[in-house]
């Protein structure tokens, strides 16, 4: 949604219906107690604050993907457990490697 600025286009990219996407965004906004998008008749766009959150989420996604690649390379025949802990308003990545 942040990339397309259109509910319809975002829903198509995700292979879900527009009402289902709208519902998920509304649930997330309710959980976070903030409005993620500035909406008008032409679509929706991220506000400045939410753009910063989005950029942080992209960095976090990149870090998690990097971690998973490293873990896969080093974990040969090992169990990898990855959890995200949102305590104290910052996400922490916890991993356990077991041989």
Image (cartoon, rainbow, N blue to C red):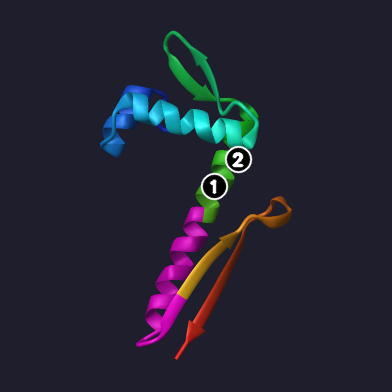
Q: Position of residue 72 (x, y in %)?
A: 38, 77
Frontmost residue, 24 versus 71? 24
Mark 2: secondary structure: helix
The stretch drawn in magenta includes residue 71: yes
Q: Which of the 4 image quadrants contains residue 18?
A: top left
Residue at 70%, 50% (x, y): give it. Answer: 89
Is residue 94 positioned above or below 85 on the image?
below
Is residue 91 positioned above or below 22 on the image?
below
Residue at 64%, 29% (x, y): give it. Answer: 34
Identify the residue position indicated by label 1 in the image.
Answer: 57
The answer to the question of whether label 1 and label 2 lie on touching residues, with beta carbons closer than 8 A, is: yes
Badge 1 local density, few (<14 within 10 Å), some, or many (20+)? few
Q: Position of residue 1 (x, y in %)?
A: 42, 31
Toward the right, the furthest residue is 88
Tell me if 52 is positioned left or right of 39 in this view. Answer: right
Toward the top, the furthest residue is 41
How many numbered marks, from 0 up? 2
Frontmost residue, 7 versus 29? 29
* Quadrant into which the C terminus falls: bottom left
Frontmost residue, 38 versus 34? 34
Say whether residue 2 is visible.
Answer: no
Q: Which of the 4 image quadrants contains residue 54?
A: top right
Residue at 48%, 57% (x, y): give it. Answer: 62
Q: Position of residue 97 (x, y in %)?
A: 49, 82
Badge 2 local density, few (<14 within 10 Å), some, or many (20+)? some
Residue range highlighted in magenta: 61-80
Identify the residue position indicated by label 2 in the image.
Answer: 53
Mark 1: secondary structure: helix
Q: Gap between marks 1 and 2, in whole Å?
A: 6 Å
Frontmost residue, 96 versus 49? 96
Residue at 29%, 28% (x, y): give it. Answer: 17
Say whether residue 15 is visible.
Answer: yes
């Amino acid at each position: 949604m942040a990339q397309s600025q259109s509910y319809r286009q975002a829903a198509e990219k995700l292979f879900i219906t527009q009402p289902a996407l709208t519902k998920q965004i509304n649930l997330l906004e309710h959980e976070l107690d903030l409005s993620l998008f500035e909406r008008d008749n032409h679509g929706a766009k991220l506000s400045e604050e939410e753009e910063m959150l989005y950029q942080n989420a992209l960095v976090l996604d990149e870090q998690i993907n990097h971690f998973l690649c490293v873990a896969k390379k080093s974990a040969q025949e090992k169990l990898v457990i990855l959890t995200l802990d949102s305590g104290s308003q910052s996400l922490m990545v916890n991993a356990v490697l077991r041989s």
